[in-house]
Image (cartoon, helix red, strand yellow):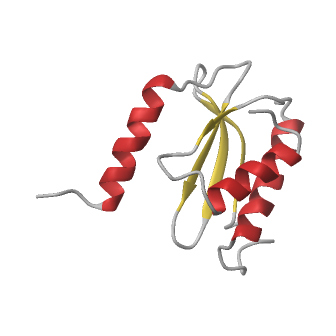
């Protein structure tokens, strides 16, 4: 029996994560999106800590539907919080999702917010 779309995404994500590691000097910007929300975390894999996080579930964005504009707002938020945590350069982990649409909008907004990747 064939797997679901979620299983296929998880396989792609595991495949990408084998070669992608976030370090103290260059943490990982991990993305996850559902049909209603999008989440972004800046993770230091060597210490196992989340340095900054943002999502569309926050009170300011919660009432908005998930669009490219909402994803861009989350990208700006996570970039600002990462800057506060002293992070300027990250490794981008798209989480098995295509670099297109909302994921791309979040990444470009994070770049505009001052993160390098």
Residue pictured at 58% horizontal, 25% vertical = 45
In the image, taking residue 111 as reference, residue 30 lies left or right, namely left
Residue 54 in view of the camera: no
Locate the C terminus by quadrant.
top right
* Residue 79 image-quadrant placement: top right
Residue pictured at 81% horizontal, 53% vertical = 109
Q: Position of residue 88 (x, y in %)?
A: 84, 30
* Residue 87 image-quadrant placement: top right
Instruction: Determine whether 44 is above or below 7 in the image.
Output: above
Residue pictured at 56% horizontal, 73% vertical = 36
In the image, taking residue 2 as reference, residue 96 lies left or right, namely right
Q: How many marks?
A: 0
Q: Position of residue 12 (x, y in %)?
A: 39, 43
* Residue 68 image-quadrant placement: bottom right
Q: Residue furthest left?
A: 1
State the residue in front, 105 or 42. Answer: 105
Locate the N terminus by quadrant.
bottom left
Residue pictured at 76% horizontal, 53% vertical = 75
Q: Position of residue 66 (x, y in %)?
A: 65, 73
Residue 36 in view of the camera: yes
Instruction: Determine whether 89 is above or below 42 in the image.
Output: above
In the image, taking residue 110 as reference, residue 27 lies left or right, namely left
């Amino acid at each position: 029996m064939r797997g679901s779309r979620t299983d296929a995404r998880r396989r792609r994500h595991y495949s990408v994560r084998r070669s992608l590691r976030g370090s103290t000097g260059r943490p990982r910007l991990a993305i996850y999106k559902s049909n209603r929300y999008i989440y972004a975390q800046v993770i230091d894999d060597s210490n196992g800590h989340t340095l900054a996080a943002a999502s569309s579930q926050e009170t300011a964005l919660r009432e908005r539907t998930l669009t490219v504009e909402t994803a861009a707002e989350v990208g700006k938020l996570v970039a600002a919080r990462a800057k506060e945590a002293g992070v300027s350069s990250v490794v981008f982990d798209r989480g098995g999702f295509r670099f297109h649409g909302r994921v791309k909008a979040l990444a470009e907004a994070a770049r505009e917010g001052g993160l390098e990747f």
